[in-house]
Image (cartoon, rainbow, N blue to C red):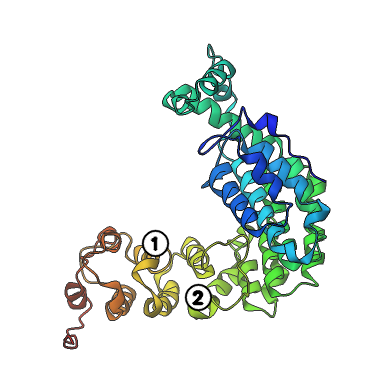
Amino acid sequence: MTEIGAGRFATLLHAYGRAIDTPEHLAVLAGGDPAARRAALEHLWSAVIHQGTPWTATPPAAVAVAALLGDPRLSGAADAELRANLLGFLAAVAEAGRSHPDLDEYAAPVGVDVDAALAAALDSGDEDELYADEVMANALYARAVLGCREIVPTLLAAATSALSDPEPAVRAAAAHAVSVCCAVPVDTTEAASLAERLDALAAQAGPDERAALVLAMGELGLAPRAYLDDPHPGVRACAALAPTLADDPTATAEILAALADPAATDGWFTHRLPQIDTRIRFTLVAAAIARVDDPDRLLPAALAIAPIASRYTVRHDWGPLLHALFAGRDPGPLSPAQRRYLGALVANEDLWDPRNGTVGLVFRDAGLSYDRDACRDLVGDRTPPPPAP
């Protein structure tokens, strides 16, 4: 059974003030009330770690969550999704501990008694005044980050244990948490042992889990080159994304091949991969742009994405490609690659809404007018548009 000590949290802060409600949320995670569990998870993701930002309540809450992962009340198949979610939370906490390596001087500013100021603010019930003082705000943030960093061994132990979970989704989430924890300096022998374990798990895993395990290998700094020959296209693409394969021609070719049919990538996996919280093609586009500086090599992927692009994905796929293909363009005529891609965007009616300022900015940054007729003239396509209904 996991005990949650409430006394300590009374002097800690989360995104919405004193963390006096955090122990109750942690306690109900091991209970059987679905509504209470949903509220508890929302509390973890919105209050305890808010959009990636840690608070002083974050480290002890994460330690409690790590202990809950070993609680027999959460060990059943029905709780697999909960266990995977909690592992994702631990990964986010470990990630928070990686930011800003030099924070010691902020955590203990010279001439300031941070503990006394915190106690006074808590006694007065006005926690907001703490953040009005820049020195205090920096001190509390630094302490939160350093606290996350200090508990990484505890989080790593819980995630490593979860690699033996009977549920594939939990093992996938555990692999991601392990790789994030190992990004904080750990013993190299331990990292090598974890790498061997991930490889052994991948050999017996289905596509969803195997892809997550391969991504974790990449996060650990390994080169999962063997998986570039995997029978599943999604696993091959995930192997190609490994940072250590950034200069590997075969890996780059695999990414470009995947983007030749970008719509197909949406059907690769049954469940979302724990490392990628958006469409995987967005990650592939970013990798392709980072690795390929030849517009002609990028063009097939750009032309494949243009028909399925929307104004809502401008920051994720077709917009970055527009910037890549038009970066540093001279005022003169378009290159053949620029003409073909801009023509493909002109043909996609969904992209042209003069009220959409975000899309307009993307065109402006590419040195283009966000005017469909002007772009149509620029590419030499003067075919009149169909009459309005």
Q: Which residue lies under the disc numbered 1? A: 315
Q: Quadrant of residue 295?
A: bottom left
Marking on residue 141: none
Disc 1 packing (10 Å; few <14; some 14–19; many ≥20): some
Residue 153 figure quarter: top right
Q: Is residue 221 above or below residue 185?
A: below
Q: Is residue 358 visible?
A: yes
Q: Is residue 383 positioned above or below 252 on the image?
A: below
Image quadrant containing the C terminus: bottom left
Q: Which residue is disc 2 drawn over?
A: 259
Residue depicted at x 20% and y 63%? 331
Q: Determine whether 21 is above or below 158 in the image.
A: above
Left or right, residue 214 beside residue 188: left
Rendered location of residue 230, percent (x, y): 70, 76
Task: Kindly identify the amino acid type of the residue bearing the numbered disc 2.
Answer: Leu
Q: Residue at x 69, y 63 (%)?
A: 81
Picture quarter containing residue 237? bottom right
Q: Secondary structure at mark 1?
A: loop
